[in-house]
Amino acid sequence: MASQTPAPQQADRQLKLLVRIVALIAGAVVLVAAGTATSSGIDAGTALQAVALTALITFASLTSVRVRVGSNNLDVTWADSALLIAAVLLPPQWAVLCAAIGVGIEKSTRKLPPIKFVFGVAKGTVDCAVAAVTLALLGGTTQPPLEHLGPLALAYLAALITDEMAIIPVIALATGTSMRDRFLADLDLRLGSAFVRFAVAVLALAVLAAEPQLLIGIPAIVFSLHLTYRGRLRARAERLAWQQLAEATDAMNVVQMETVLQTAVRNGARLFSADRVEIEVCLDGAQQSVRGTQSSITYHGEPDQRPVDEATTAVVALIGDNDGERVGELRLCFQVPVALSEREQFTLRAFAGALCTAIRNAASYAQLEQMAGQHQHDATHDLLTGLPNRRRLQLDTEDALDRKRGGRGVTALLVLDLNHFKDVNDALGHGAGDQVLIAVAQRLSAAAGDEALVTRLGGDEFAVLLRNLPAPALALYQAEHLLSTLHEPVDVDGMPLVVSASAGVATGPCEGGFVELLRRADIAMYQAKRTGCSVAAYAPDNDTADRGRLVVGGMLPRAVAQKEFILQFQPIVDLASGEPISAEALARWQHPDKGMVDPRSFLGSIERSGLLTAFTDAVLDQALAGAARWRALGCRWPVAVNISPRSLLDRRLPALVTRRLDDHGLPGDALVLELTESHTVSQLDIVDKVLAELAELGCMIALDDFGTGYSSLSVLSRVPAKELKIDRSFVTQMENTPSAAAVVRSHLELGRHLDLLVVAEGVERDSQRHMLWDLGCTAGQGHLFAKPMPIEEVLALITADDGPVRLAPPLHDPAAVVRMPAKRAPGRISRATGTTGANGGERV
Ligand code: C2E
Ligand code: CA
Ligand code: CA
């Protein structure tokens, strides 16, 4: 038996052909029978018997148990018992005619379509003919029946096989199921009932042979057997239905929406024996529709608004139990109108409930999955440019460096920083800055190629991971190529803006992995900026941290915890008198093995590690402790502390400063915070807030290394500074280089205009002191006066003799100077009176 189901039109054609064949055979049989009957004639007894048996066939056919298969009803009847009796008792021709008439009467009482009527009558007729002919071939006499059980059984079996052969293909074709399924459906029950029907027929024949009057009881026996059979069939159908429902709901216990819907369509079609099942889902505005049969899904997509035939479709709304929200609709479609039994309606409601839950679970799952995907994306991407971020860069770099995972060739990291980007933000606003960053991101991505990963590190800094390079030299070439894509001006609101960048390149592998590679590329980038070239490769000679061969990163936590960081103090002096007016605290790392370590070799690592707050706190604590000690000796010098740019992003900094001031019983103006200007230009609001809070505490703000950054002047308008420190590089060169002298002069001019104290850094020679003084500078710091020293040395200086502390002889005879108020005149408190000394911070 084929298990393939043919296409609907083809099935329809095959069905009609099959019915026609059965009808033709039956017609031929009836014609032969009628011919034989007319020629042989009939006696009165046989005629009476024929009438009675016709009635019996009609009655037996009427006692049916109906089973619905799809849109088709299958009737299981007692007709074959009656047909066998007729075949035994009547001559074959009359048996055939009785069968045709009896079944015909029964079929005409039901309002059947012609094709079903013809098929039913033809089948009954042929069944009977087969039984009669088999008996005739086996000898004819079958009375008394119990002695001829063999021929009787064979005749019945032949009729039964004929019947099944006709009915199985017809039902399979009509319902679109396989013949194998139809053959196996309830096979045991069908065989059992066939045996019972045969037994009943034999019993009836035996009774008739012994005592014809007893035949009266036969219909009662048949009827009770019929009821038993029907009950069995129903119980079984019920059990099967619940079992299938459990299976169907179990199968929907999956998280993918597609699987849920398609499984529900298939199982729904099977469970309710529907010709087609449709599910329409509408969740969060998104709609989808799935259609199909037991064996296949015929449509899955957007709802196509096909009209629903209410007569042939059972529709259930899918509504959530808890919130009553409608998530869609389940439709069972039949070819003809079908009334669902009570049991089927219960099952349908249970099925719809389970489907609704499964749909919502799948929707929640999809939502979770989508959110997880979004988080994953956000965690590894920059929101403004859409480029991958530092995290992704780290993962991919580590991957590329790890040769075991298939890394081939050379891995290089390129760090690229835009020049003068702050000016774009300052002059044109953040919107313009964002446009520039997006344009740069696009150009780099377009030019970088598939093997490269372009990422944004933050601000105006980008990094490009170059993988599988055939040679290290190609990294520089690639960097040049990427920078060249920025030559074309960027269009910002119709205005062409020229963008330039500096890039540093470092090639792997290197000990320390990604972090070290990034640090090296960073150093190379700064080298490029310093030297004014567009690209520089990492060179160990330029790497102060590397020169000391300190594996700084790993040692930091211990160093912070064990307080290995100490401070030295370098006095800032009044240029005229040579007396200190304040002191700058400079951090030193007293390394157990390496001795005193230069701050520039560990500050970067501290800034990058999570230890900055602890470090800043320790520095503030020690610096203010020092200030409190020299105050106790009568010196009111404020202490200047260097503050890292990143500390200004820390909201807790003002609170930290307040606590440390309180700890040492000092007022806010005992502390100067030195900021390098590149920090302070940070456009983040938080920096403004932190600075304003610090100024409110009374702390003074000094702009360190002034003139070395890009936007020195714009900074002054934003930062509440009281002091400006001219960078050592200008002081060193001012005597020989006119431009350096011009810078010093303009800074002093600026200081006068804005009423700022200007301090010259790195004063090493007396000539520099004189020149600065002549240019109008009042304060200086440098080896000429004192090198940074431990606190004990500072205290020793103060207590060395009774007069004021003097680190260089005064420029003029103290008696001949005209005194002017200084910007900062803490000077020295007379140890006797507690009043401020007369000469600090004044000039002629
Ligand atoms: P800076 O703030 O510009 O500090 C002045 C630097 O110049 C100090 O270097 C000082 O020792 C040096 N110096 C002073 N006078 C002279 C001179 O006459 N000639 C020469 N050649 N150098 C002189 P140092 O101590 O190595 O500090 C370097 C930088 O490290 C500082 O530059 C500052 O930016 C940073 N730094 C130092 N301590 C700290 C700290 O506690 N926290 C933070 N965030 N940064 C610090
Ligand atoms: Ca400083
Ligand atoms: Ca400085």
Image (cartoon, rainbow, N blue to C red):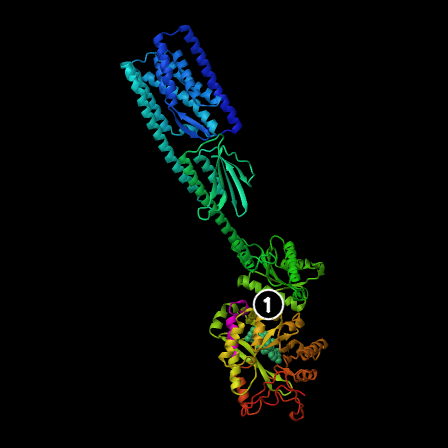
Please give left or right for residue 341 compared with residue 617 in the image. Answer: left
Q: Residue furthest bottom?
A: 815
Give the residue at x 62% y 65%.
Answer: 525
Residue 518 vs residue 172, the one in the foreground: 172
Q: In the image, is residue 617 part of the stretch drawn in magenta? A: yes
Please give left or right for residue 713 compared with residue 243 in the image. Answer: right
Q: In the image, is residue 75 part of the stretch drawn in magenta? A: no
- Residue 652 in view: yes
- Disc 1 is placed on an element classified as helix
Q: Is residue 60 above or below residue 725?
A: above
Residue 211 lies in quadrant: top left
Magenta highlight range: 606-622
Where residue 535 sits in the image (x, y, percent)?
65, 63
Residue 835 lies in quadrant: bottom right
Where residue 7 sits in the image (x, y, percent)?
52, 29
Residue that mark 1 sits on: 685
Where residue 109 sits in the image (x, y, percent)?
43, 21
Q: Quadrant of ligand 2?
A: bottom right
Give the residue at x 47% y 72%.
Answer: 561
Other-residue count near label 1 (Cα within 10 Å), few / some / many at <14 / 14–19 / ≥20 = few
* Residue type of the residue flagged with mark 1: Asp
